[in-house]
Image: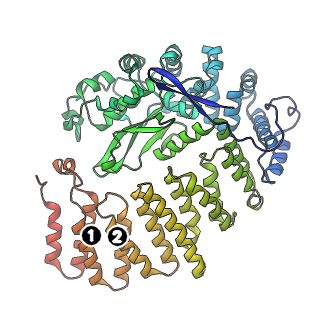
Amino acid sequence: MVLTVGLAAGGLRAAVAVGPARPASGPKTAAPADGPVANRSAAELKADLVAGAAQGKLTDALLKLFRDYTAARVREQYVPKNIPEDLWQWILASKELRDAILVGLHPENERDLRTLGRLSALRAKFGPKVDEFPHLALAFAIVYGYAGDEGVREPGLYFVEKNRPPPSMEDSFDYYLKNEKKMKMSLKTTPWPLLIYVADNDLPIIERRWALGRYGAKPPGAYGQVYYDVSYDEATINDEEGGRLASKARSLSNILQYGGVCRHQAYFASRVFKSMGVPSMYDRGEGARGGHAWVAWVGRAAKTADLLFAARFDYDRYFTGTLFNPLARRDVLDRDVQLDVAAMLRSYPGYLNAVAACRMYTMLDDGPRAKATGLLDGAIRQNAYASTSWRLMAMDVAKGVIPRKVGETMYAKMITTFAQYPDLTYQVLRMILEPRLKPSEKPKDKEITDNLRLLDGAFGLYVRAERPDLAVRLRYLQGQYLEACDRREQAMKLYVMASEKFATEHFGFVPLYDRACVIMKEDGKTDLMLKYMKMVAEKVPEFQADFTRRNNLVNPTYKHVILKYAAALREAGKKAEAETWADRLQTKPKG
């Protein structure tokens, strides 16, 4: 099976073909249905499923059994009490909807039932069109079903609400059906985990038409310019009433006409893209100049696709950001969403199989899990970018369910696989090492050396990936490990060297700095501590850029180290010198 994701190219939708999922070993199986298993209870199917999963081998037969079990469980719990019989039969008859719901959602709670209710409403109004656009319909059902009474607008976008209520689910879905041929990505073949970032469009229909009319002919290579079409109005930074946009409604046309700041630019661009059928997000984070918002979207990168960004300024070091995930209903790391995009492009069927393998693994108790790590291996073979398998591995290594060596072997594979996605490697490594930070007895020298080698390897990965934010966190983790191994002096030196190296950056080094100071103070090395604190205080910039200088936005890290150094000087009896340093925080912006 080949997944095709339509991407715009030269005004036409070109297809990026993605390789099929690797078939699980075992015989080929027919699609799951309500036939042969109808006379078997969910409990009976679960018993067989758990027994099969405990063998630790992902097969087609086991994947079918998982779907059959889920179908039986949902039927017993919800049909016809919460889910009408005809709706359930319709879902089972549609391969795309059935697999997505039985595996991708695995209905278990009220919001899943709301999703199926929303799907039923779309079916009632649009009939065969839902069968023609199953991924789009499911994306809408998820977004509106999971939102419930909260509404589909992102919680953080309070500044656009005035006189601009989002349309109903039906009206929004109808907009995409009527304009399907004008959309820049296929609404039929793009997987629903990406289309949720289209279905969550909060624009009134009239504004979507405006966006499509103005930008619909724009070539994909110029999408990044849309963000900059909104002129920057610096008067809006601290008080929206002071800008030209003032009390006007935050419609796209008004934002374009009157300008705004980064949050208006990011909102504008992301909603233009959504209105053209391009999965896109309002993204934001902390960088060298403080908080900032930019736009992210799924677009062409070389011969494939990726999560692309505009106004994510490298020189301001916005290494990570957060965006709102309408499925999770919370903010998530944008780098994790980028990994989700990679998973969808690798293989959507493989993604579902990997999810099923992980769900089966979690159904096992700790004892059987130790012998069933082949399920995680199988998940990785199906789709290495489906991150749940790696997280489960790390969690069970930390718990002692999976032997350390097995986990470290898997992690070694991960270093290569995720060279372009290093954030997950840090999350996994952090979990793997967590229990080693509190050893019951001092580890042997060889074990310490091996673990330090593992940490140094990860550090090298982050340096090559040009991710100093992760490199700093890695060094802090390494220092914690050294302290746990009773190598306090070595840890202190590592904290000092790393904090000195990264003192001019906005991120991360403060914990290194603070910990180094604590160790020196506790060890009675006051003179050395003061010398070190002065070196850092002289190195950290007061303002990170001309922009922050003009707006008197003092570097928070600068404040931290100055105040800490002044307090240490007072404690050491050097009050005059302490006041001199404290007075630096009262200076006016220069230039």
Q: Is residue 326 above or below residue 258?
A: below
| Three-letter code, disc 2 | Tyr
Q: Residue 83 appears at what percent x and percent y?
A: 71, 27
Q: Is residue 64 visible?
A: yes
Q: How many marks?
A: 2
| Three-letter code, disc 1 | Val
The residue that mark 1 highlights is 536
Horizontally, residue 329 falls left or right of residue 22, namely left
Find numbered disc 2 in the image and state the secondary structure of the residue it sits on: helix
Q: Mark 1: give few (<14), some (14-19) or many (20+) Cα within 10 Å.
A: many
Name of the residue lying farthest toward the front:
303
Instruction: Compute the Cα span from label 1 to label 2.
Output: 8 Å
Res 580 quadrant in image: bottom left
Do the numbered discs 1 and 2 sit on residues whose CB atoms are within 8 Å?
yes
Q: Residue 266 appears at what percent x and percent y?
A: 35, 35
Q: Is residue 105 visible?
A: no
Q: Is residue 351 above or below residue 562?
A: above
Q: Residue 269 appears at what percent x and percent y?
A: 37, 30
Name of the residue lying farthest toward the bottom:
524
The residue that mark 2 highlights is 513
Front-most of residues 378 and 220: 220
Q: Earlier in the sequence, mark 1 or mark 2?
A: 2
Horizontally, residue 374 falls left or right of residue 252, namely right
Front-most of residues 501 and 244: 501
Res 445 quadrant in image: bottom right
Horizontally, residue 375 falls left or right of residue 309, namely right
Q: Residue 115 appears at what percent x and percent y?
A: 61, 30
Q: Mark 2: give few (<14), some (14-19) or many (20+) Cα within 10 Å.
A: many
Q: Residue at x 13, y 54 (%)?
A: 589
Front-most of residues 486 and 586: 486
